[in-house]
Image (tube, rainbow, N blue to C red):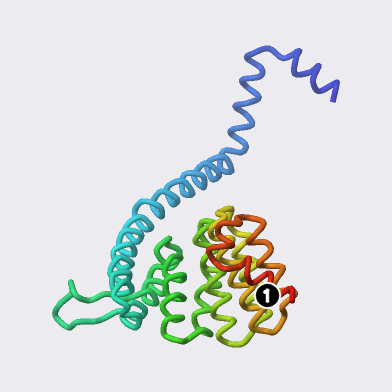
Amino acid sequence: MANENTEIQDLSTEEITDKATDFFESNKSIIYGLAGLVVIVIVGFYWYKFQYQAPREISADDELFKAEQMMERDSFELALNGRDVLGQEGSSFIGFSGIIAQYSGTEAANIAHYKAGAALLRMDKPDLALEYLKEYSGPSELQAQAYSLMGDAASMQSDFSAALGYYEDAAGATDNTSLQVYYYYKAGRLQEHQNKPAEAAKYFQKIADKDMKVAEALGVDKDLIRLAQ
């Protein structure tokens, strides 16, 4: 290695230029190929992001807005599956399930998993709700709420162990004290429902430790006295 460095230092600028030219001429097909590949990757990325994905995001958002309107009206079946009105394109929409199927990879499709799960819970279909909710991934507070809904779905199926785990996941997914208290409260009530007063008391105590005023508002302070008897 020292000999090679000495040889390079002994070369003149002209000789170095000649060597570089010789290297390029010997390997230009490879160099051109790599350069072309880089261009293709860059062009492909921008085409996908701006020519393909961006318009899909806009269309998906529009469909999501229509489905959410139905959700707000408690029209859960329509929100989930959409509506096809013959000859009235403006009145037609594909619903949460359609968004997931047709706009996979968009943020609207991700949100649609959460919304579909919530709608299915209101339709008393906890098994399907759980499948959709498991596919959602989002910001901490919405993710926490998704876990909470998953807990409700599991509880509706009498899978209380799974439900408790989801409520704990919900409390751990957010730093919002009010939300944490809400999830601990659900966990405590679930444990009490299973005739586990000591375990229920642990969750109620967590609420009291976090915010005694909230604990008193929920009646948790009285619950702790009652469960201790």
Instruction: Identify the residue at image location x=81%, y=16%.
Output: 6
Front one among 226 and 7: 226
Instruction: Count every numbered label the image shows and give the total.
Output: 1
Q: In the current view of this chain or complex, which residue is farthest to the right?
A: 2
Indicate the position of residue 151 as horizontal and vertical percent values.
58, 75
The quarter of the picture where the C terminus appears is: bottom right
Q: Position of residue 71 (x, y in %)?
A: 33, 74
Identify the image quadrant of residue 57: bottom left
Q: Amino acid at mark 1?
A: Arg
Above or below, comparing residue 33 to residue 69 in the picture: above
Q: Quadrant of residue 214?
A: bottom right
Which residue is at a point 55% across and 65% down the rendered structure image? Answer: 182
Figure quadrant of residue 70: bottom left
Q: Position of residue 128 (x, y in %)?
A: 50, 83
Q: Is residue 15 left or right of residue 152?
A: right
Depth check: 152 or 39 in front?
152
Place of residue 66 in the rendered image (x, y in percent of width and height, measured from the top left): 28, 69
Above or below for 77 versus 200: below
For label 1, the residue is: 226
Placement of the N terminus among the 4 image quadrants: top right
